[in-house]
Amino acid sequence: MKKFFMTMFALILALSCVLMATACSSGKSIKIGVQSGTTAEFFVKGNQEMLYDGFSNAECMSYDSSGLAVSAMLNGQVNYVIVDNEPAKMLVAQNAGAIKMIDVPLTTEEYALGVDKNQAGLLESINTILAQMEENGKMDEIFEKYNSLVYDDDGNVIGGDENIVGIESAAKNNDNPQGQLVVATNAEFAPFEYKKGNLYVGIDMEIAQYIAQQLELELVIENMEFDSVVTAVGKNNIDVAIAGLSVTASRKSSVNFSSSYYKGAYQVLLVKADNTEFDGKTKEQIIQTIKNK
Amino acid sequence: MEKQWNNFCRELFDNGGYKDVLNGLLATVEIAVFGLIIGIIIGTLIAMVKVVPKYKILPRILEKVVDVYVGFFRGTPMVVQLLLGYFVLLPLLGIAVDSIIVAIVIFGLNSGAYVSEIMRAGIQSVDSGQLEAGRALGLSYGKTMMRIVIPQSIKNILPTLGNEFITLIKETSVVSFIAVVDLTKAFRQIGAAHYEYLVPYVVLALVYLVLVMLIALGVKMIERRFKRSERRYSK
């Protein structure tokens, strides 16, 4: 019996050593935080279709929201965070003094709505409404509303939010899918979609509300993980994905993209406020600096 | 279906997805194995505290402490403990630790709470005459426990410990909350490349199933080995 225990113990010990050794020798020198499922994740890991080389020396740490990635950076769990430019501005405003944004576009992207492939009519009417919004200034008005938010030093909104009215999601009615516009989103992506109490606010949410009003449909908002937003479209009566969704080739195989409503999207680097290694550098220099780590 | 299968194979083999899957498998096994080892150590200590006679003041205080510990780790979900550890405790301490280490420690602490109850049941299942005999022969309380009672109890609780290991393996599927790439996350990433999750999720389920069946087989073999020392009353 004793012999058996000794062998077992030795076996476990040996196994532990092997596992530990493999765990420590991953060979990655830096860690970059991203939100799970975003183009930033593909940018760090590399993607052939999007022509991203990726960083072979960087470990990609995927969090559920970019806010969590930033708090991990502040605690030293990751070196940098890569995130979309508009949310980056919000994150910097809310973590004033602790982080800063290197405002150099690492990618160029466009946001569009992902529409169910089986609803060609819906895609057409959404495109018409989007064109109409551009024309009558409604789109500019919505973007302006979220650009004029004023923050205090602690990142609390202290002004500019007078015109922002929260949107309530109607209860989903599976018996009457024709009467409802069901949108999938991930409400952790300020200023495009986030929550204020139990109400939804953000640029995308207001666009969705406008579209629903024009189509005379009830707006239902389904809040889910960003990973699932694209796949959810076309299932369980979900009609549209609107989640600051960049147009990519692989997403096109799952949804039909509308015309884009925001063309200025790009990925930026967030670093701690005392980090100066990227100041005044171009995109190529920034990527090279990270690769040389 | 065929297109989805082809996409899955291309992502897995041509685009290097298998590396993530293997690393994910390693992470899953690593967290569960080390979690269980830490859990058994902590669990045994807690169980000893619980069964020790309460004549003196120190055992009484210790018992209250372990009650709080077990209460906390059994009373909150594993995901919440991971998030607390990673996003609350570490910033408070001001140290940066690899997320996989955080996962191992939290799984160990959590498992310790469950194993302690298993161990206590095991120790109490051993006839009290064994302890009395050991003490009568002049062994100290600790020695009697370590040499006589616990080895016998381990034989009794082995199936339940195997169960705990299987539970740990399956519970590791939530560690992507703190940015560990485990088996589940690796397959989710493969699905995310084409937004087709049907094949990846089915294969993921099969991998977990095979893993758990292998463990169950291993536990059964160890059990059979232990049975050899038993007196055979019948065939």
Image (spheres, coloured by chain):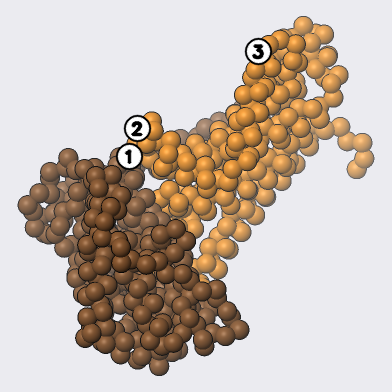
Distance CA(mark 3)–CA(mark 1): 38 Å
Tell which subunit mark 2 falls on: B
Residue at position x 76%, y 32% from top? B121
Q: Considering only vertical position in the picture, is A263 above or below A162?
A: below
Q: Residue furthest left?
A: A280
Residue B184 in the figure: left or right of residue A195: right
Chain the render paints brown: A
As shown in the figure, which amino acid type bears the numbered disc 2? Gly
State whether discs 2 and 1 lie on one chain: no
Is residue A272 left or right of A254 when viewed as pictured? left
Image quarter (top left, top right, bottom left or bottom right) of the N terminus of chain A: top right
Question: Residue B58 got which mark?
Answer: 3
Labelled pair 2, 1 in contact (Cβ < 8 Å): yes
Relative horizontal placement of residue A39, taking residue A199 as reference (left or right): left
Residue type of the residue flagged with mark 1: Asn
Residue B33 sits above or below residue B147 on the image = below
- Could you say which chain is coloured orange in the image? B
Question: Residue A83 in the image: x percent, y percent?
Answer: 27, 58
Residue kind at label 3, given as amino acid type: Leu
Marks 2/3: CA distance?
33 Å
Instruction: Please name the residue that numbered disc 1 is placed on.
Output: A75
Quadrant of res A242: bottom left
Residue at which label 2 appears: B94
Q: Position of residue B151 (x, y in %)?
A: 72, 26
- Identify the disc placed on residue B162: none
User: In this view of the protein, can residue B44 be seen by the observer?
Assistant: no
